[in-house]
Amino acid sequence: MFSRQQDPIVAIATAPGRGAVGIVRVSGKGLGPLVQALLGRALRPREATYLPFRGGDGFAIDHGLALYFPAPHSFTGEDVLELQAHGGPVVLQLLMARCLEVAAQLAAGTAAPLLPGLRVAQPGEFSQRAFLNDKLDLAQAEAIADLIDASTEAAVKSASRSLSGEFSRDIHTLRDALIHLRMLVEATLDFPEEEIDFLRKADAAGQLQNLKDQLAVVRQRARQGALLREGIRVVIAGQPNAGKSSLLNALAGAELAIVTPIAGTTRDKVEQTIQIEGVPLHVVDTAGLREGADEVEQIGIARAWEAIHAADAVLMLHDLTRCDDPEYIAADADIASVMGQKDHQIHLWNKCDVCPPDALRHVAEGDLAISAKAGLGLNDLRQRLLQAVGWQAAPEGLYMARERHVRALAVVGDHLDVAAGWLGHRAEHLDLLAEELRLAQGALGEITGEFSADDLLGEIFSRFCIGK
């Protein structure tokens, strides 16, 4: 009896829409009969064959290439058949329907079904099977989706490195060092007469410190990789007519937001993704923050505050041409009190090209004087944004990572810190040391999928596109 994970699956593997080429992919055990019945001939493994794809009435749906990858030498580790046809959506739907039709005939035609249960694949199910069949670990499988979703060249290169296994190899190096240290501690527990002297002679403290140092390097690269993948959510905030929309347009290099001298022009969020040194920045222009706005503008202001609280960085824009106006200063103070100690606030003093010379005295140390209209100070702003969220110039070999990985590595670090504390105690606490090391190894295993709950796997692969 086949389980759902053992069912053969079929899906259109190329993106929706029209294109020159489209691919229908089938994966499962024992696809030979399907290949013969569908194409009227056997195929040589891993060799492209040009032939007609015929429907049940014998009429050729299309002509294209067929490739057969017998297990285990395929992406999923199962038999895989790929039909490459012209990329019309109806053509591909007809080919997929024909695969299901032929499989149903094979299943019904014999006492022992030749190909039971061919069904349409769920999102990410091909990649999930590659993971379950040890063709990829979990970090590599996630890198497939990251490579597809990459929005910058740096993100593509980093995702490719993760897919090739660089991130996983670093995790495995940490795991192996951790296992060796665990063996020392467990041996001490088994032979308590040796106690602490055994660990001291084996330099367990030095090994643990080396492990923590290696972890620090991996964590730094993972944080950088997470920034490449997730990007930085930046909100431009300030009073009306401070130049928020002009700043968005200047950063994006396009006229995205309407700019007028009329207060309250922007009444809702306007968002654009740009990149700085390969890092995606999701920049949001918001409604001007002020009292006494009409009902529609108040809705926009409420959404502005929501965006501010959810942002990774806030560009707080001030107008240098009004910085001596008591009402403007009071309103700025009110905004600052509501903003509080929001992390990564960057105070920008706009219109430095047209303000009185003495107005620049308001620019405090650490703030930036800019002109969104003239483009002054924008390069410094770009660098300040990257610094604010911890980005460093991408080192060679940077790999893609996710927030899930960053959190797991943080958990590993916490357990190693506690373990270091227990290592300095007396022998009766060695069982606590051993437990912290075990928990650290478990957190590492969650990254590559060695120790992963089924619900976590379902959540990860459900976010993939169908056919991948």
Image: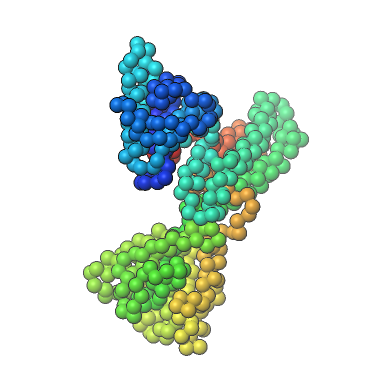
Residue 292 in the figure: left or right of residue 157:
left
Identity of the residue furthest to the top in this view: 111
Q: How is the image coloured?
A: rainbow
Q: Quadrant of residue 192?
A: top right
> Residue 420 lies in what quarter of the image?
top right
Looking at the picture, tell me which residue is in the foreground, 42 or 290. 42
Query: Which quadrant, please, contains the C terminus?
Result: top left
Foreground residue, 78 or 45?
Answer: 45
**Residue 222 x, y percent position in the rendering:** 56, 49
Q: Nearer the viewer, residue 142 or 102?
A: 102
Q: Is residue 143 above or below residue 36?
A: below
Foreground pick, 78 / 197: 78
Q: Is residue 230 something that shows in the picture?
A: yes
Q: Residue at x 43, y 24 (%)?
A: 35
| x and y, in percent, of residue 137 in the image | 54, 35
Image quadrant holding the N terminus, namely top left
From this viewpoint, is residue 6 visible? Answer: no
Q: Residue at x 35, y 42 (%)?
A: 88
Q: Is residue 152 above or below residue 264?
A: above
Rendered residue at 55%/41% (across/down): 163
Residue 305 drawn above or below residue 92: below
Question: Percent x, y for residue 226?
Answer: 52, 51
Q: Residue at x 42, y 45 (%)?
A: 20
Query: Quick check: 60 left or right of 205?
Result: left
| Location of residue 153 in the rendering, given as x and y in whole percent from the top left corner | 54, 54
The image quadrant of residue 23 is top left
Q: In the current view of this chain or complex, which residue is farthest to the left?
A: 295
**Lateral position of residue 195 relative to residue 439, left or right:** right
